[in-house]
Amino acid sequence: MSGLALFAHQFRYDQKAFWRNPASVFFTVMFPVILLLIFATVFGGQTVEVRGGIKTTAYYVPAIITLSVISATMQSLAMSLVIAREDGRLKRGRGTPMPAWVFIAGRVGNSAVVALLMLALIATIGRVLYGVAIPWGELPAIVLTLLVGAAAFCCLGIALTAAIPSQDAAAPIVNALLLPLYFLSGVFIPDDQLPSGVIHFAGIFPIRHFFEAFFDVYDPGNTGAALQWGDLAVVAAWGAAGLLIAIRRFRWTPRGG
Amino acid sequence: MADPVITIRGLRKSYGELEAVRGIDLEVRAGEVLAFLGPNGAGKTTTVEILEGYRRRSGGEVTVLGEDPERGDRAWRERIGMVLQSCRLDPYLTVRESLALYAGYYRSPRPVEEVVELVGLTGKADERTGSLSGGQQRRLDVGMALVGDPELLFLDEPTTGFDPSARRQAWETIAGLRDLGKTVFLTTHYMDEAQRLADRVTIIARGAVVASGTPADLGNRESLPTTISYRLDGEQVSLETRSPVADLHELTSRAVGEGLELEGLEVTRPNLEDIYLSLTAEAEEG
């Protein structure tokens, strides 16, 4: 089989396993939707003082899409790879003629597809329930920004597995990293409520930059050159660092036992 | 004669100070089932992982299907199937899907339906692996090793932790591999498993081979004493002897002469289990 056919084969089964796993469907698909509904219900009708004031829901739709992409890539990959590694499935797969990259590519492909699906889902909910316009004209920029982010956070997720010693440790470590950064980066708490020091600090990390880049292409009030090359460059640099760590530190064999 | 499927010469493996494998020599011929037997920590898994290409050796020569496992490529992996000591299969795929997934990794796989039948999971083909019993999961695991139609199979402790009926079913599956003409390298710490399934048995302890031969050869070893036991005046007596015929003659003559009854008189030859335990115990003490 050619590389592409092998990838398609692996991807098909990774998709099946993903959609049948209640934990992955809940945390990757349902949880962002629930967050959007909660934020929109609690803060609905208010305005956020960015760009001269926008509706809270218009702020939270791109914010939750940002979270969904990170969740479908970094979080989902780190968790599922550690589980597969500790179960011995990665090691077993390595014992077959399948090239190693196919195993990783299947999961990365799965993450990318889920991320795009979440874009469509959250954008649709935002449009239907809260009247947040979908910026069709910016679609190429939106998809490009999303894919740069998805690629970078996939690399970071694979790199992160090197720091996770066991299945039990996967969720705490991933959440301990991501949750505070969602708060500090303006994903959960709007920019105008955050002290500038906090935003500067969050600016060290890729979540803030990905959020900014995505917000700017998605914000319907924004016209003209929406692609934020500076932010995307920071996101890509983090992704490249993740890729280096992943190449050097990724393990196929279980660490426990 | 055809080249051996596996050749090991002076294999060594150390982890820092610890020498896990210290000079193993072994050959496995095409179509035979070799049991690689030893207690926990004897170096079985280290050895099998070197043969599978997962670990690098510290010394010695190893050839598996004509290649050095450290340089085994895709074509080499096409010819090998393996069941790891512990591997949890994807609980969200069905039996048929798990086999189809692995079949897709090989150039000329066996038909999935055929493998389902070979490992005795016909009625379970559409069940998710998460709902299978431990024994059924292990048989599926064997099926996944088999689906690429390899020449050589590594089975690392395939029945550890099984209840007797699950073991018996797994044994039937493994015995079926021989009928398919596969060469099987079976790692186990159960003597009865080796005796039941293997053409040849190699026993290792503390990283070295302590005995090797067919189950029958090993069973005929004269190294262990025969036990004569009986009850006399309600007291259990047990004698170990290396000349059972003479001793038995003397004992029974005296008993007849003195009009004594030797209740429950029994003569026990050492079985394979005893031989295995004594061999590995010697090595552990040595």
Image (spheres, rainbow, N blue to C red):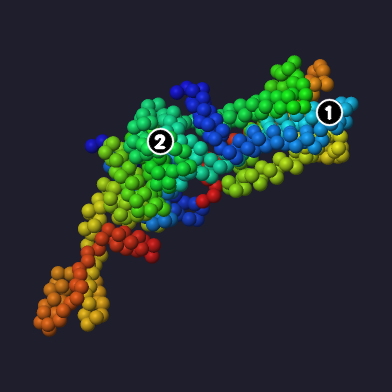
Q: Is residue B138 left or right of residue B182?
A: right
Q: Which residue is mark 2?
A: B125
Picture coordinates of residue A109, whole percent (x, y): 58, 28
As shown in the figure, which amino acid type bears the numbered disc 1? Lys
Q: Of residues B73 and B157, which is closer to you in this image?
A: B157
The crowding category of the residue bearing disc 1, from other C-alpha atoms within 10 Å (few below 14, some 14 to 19, many at least 20), is some
Q: Position of residue A175 (x, y in %)?
A: 68, 43
Q: Is residue B84 left or right of residue A161?
A: left
Which residue is rendered at x = 45% and y = 54% of the image? B19
Give the residue displayed 15% in from the left and 77% down from the top. B251
Question: In the rendering, which numbered label is found on residue B182?
Answer: none
Disc 2 on helix, strand or loop?
loop
Q: Nearer the viewer, residue B279 or B94?
A: B94
At 80% from the left and 21% from the top, the residue drawn is: A220
For disc 2, the chain is: B
Give the residue at mark 1.
Answer: A55
Chain on which label 1 sits: A
Instruction: Work out whether residue B150 or residue B72 is closer to the camera in this orientation and state it.
Output: B150
The residue drawn where x is 34% and y is 36% is: B117
- Which quadrant holds the N terminus of chain A? top left
Marks 2/1: CA–CA distance: 53 Å
Q: Is residue B92 left or right of residue B7?
A: right
Which residue type carries mark 2? Answer: Ala
Res A114 → quadrant: top right
Is any atom of residue A94 visible in this view? no
Q: Can you name the residue that lies furthest to the bottom here? A: B258
Res B2 visible: yes
SS category of the residue bearing label 1: strand
